[in-house]
Amino acid sequence: DIQMTQSPSSLSASVGDRVTITCRSSQSISGYLNWYQQKPGKAPQLLIYVASSLQSGVPSRFSGSGSGTDFTLTISSLQPEDFATYYCQQSYSIPTFGQGTRLEFK
Amino acid sequence: QVHLQESGPGLLKPSETLSLTCTVSGGSVSGNYWSWIRQPPGRRLEWLGYIYYSGSTNYNPSLKSRVTISVDTSKNQFSLKLSSVTAADTAVYYCARHRLGATTNFDYWGQGALVTVSS
């Protein structure tokens, strides 16, 4: 299986901050990388697919980039509703997920 | 808007078979792929397998011998069976629509069903 590693595992930030989360795969996955947001007690929601495409209805402050083995999710200006856990997921082969990055209020 | 809802027993004993059903509303199971994904407490999400509305399946090799996914197009449902459960199978189980192709991802999810395995 392709292993997905996110950094950091947790992150403290304030409303209005620019935040970047990194995801690295154990082998090249081209651009087959998705990002999800999960709030406590809720199902994950798709934010970004194929590394940089914004899912319908997702605010434009979210953006993704990368290819090969290194990817980033950026939130340009944090809003109160963005405090959640974020997961990357590769779709190059059998789907696997990162361990998650918990975004907390500073 | 597609809505998915998981249902099934929330408490099992070791060696029993887990059975969950996902009911799809606001859309049809036909023409789509559907997956089961689980999340053990404090751990990362794990994909279990998918089914196409025609009945073809693909399972995670790590669980392949214990997992069976089926579909009932007449009821707009698909189901998961996981045999010989242990405490390690305690998790929140999600059903999701699995978009396959150039933009493979999980775009609609159920709210999740907590299944606890305990003697």
Image (cartoon, coloured by chain):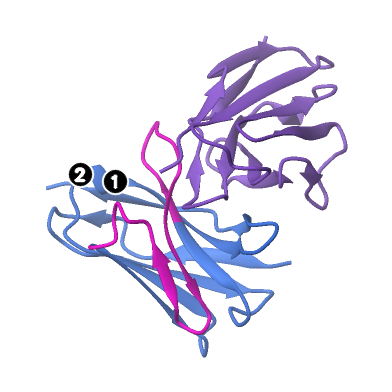
Q: Which mark is residue B14?
A: none
The amino acid on which the numbered mark 2 sits, given as a three-letter code, is: Ala
The amino acid on which the numbered mark 1 sits, given as a three-letter code, is: Thr
Q: Is residue A62 above or below residue A54?
A: above
Label pair 2/1, CB-CB below 8 angstroms: yes
- Element carrying mark 1: loop
From the image, tell me which residue sits under label 2: B87
* Quadrant of res A7: top right
Query: The chain coloured purple carries which letter?
Result: A
Measuring 18% from the left and 49% from the top, which residue is drawn there? B86
From the image, tell me which residue sits under label 1: B90
Measuring 52% from the left and 41% from the top, which residue is drawn there? A41
Magenta-colored span: B37-65
Tell me the subunit letter for badge 1: B
The quadrant of the image that shows the N terminus of chain B is: bottom right
Measuring 85% from the left and 39% from the top, which residue is drawn there? A59
**In this picture, residue B1 sits left or right of residue B49:** right
Picture coordinates of residue A16, whole percent (x, y): 84, 16
Q: Is residue B25 magenta?
A: no
Q: Is residue B60 magenta?
A: yes
- Element carrying mark 2: helix
Tell me the subunit letter for badge 2: B
Q: Is residue A77 above or below residue A29?
A: above
Point out the residue furthest to the right here.
A60
Picture coordinates of residue A46, whole percent (x, y): 68, 47
Picture coordinates of residue B73, whole percent (x, y): 52, 86
**In this picture, residue A31 sits left or right of residue B9:** right
**In this picture, residue A45 sits left or right of residue B96:** right
Is A91 in front, or is B39? A91
* Quadrant of res B105: bottom right
* Quadrant of res A60: top right
Query: The chain coloured blue carries which letter?
Result: B
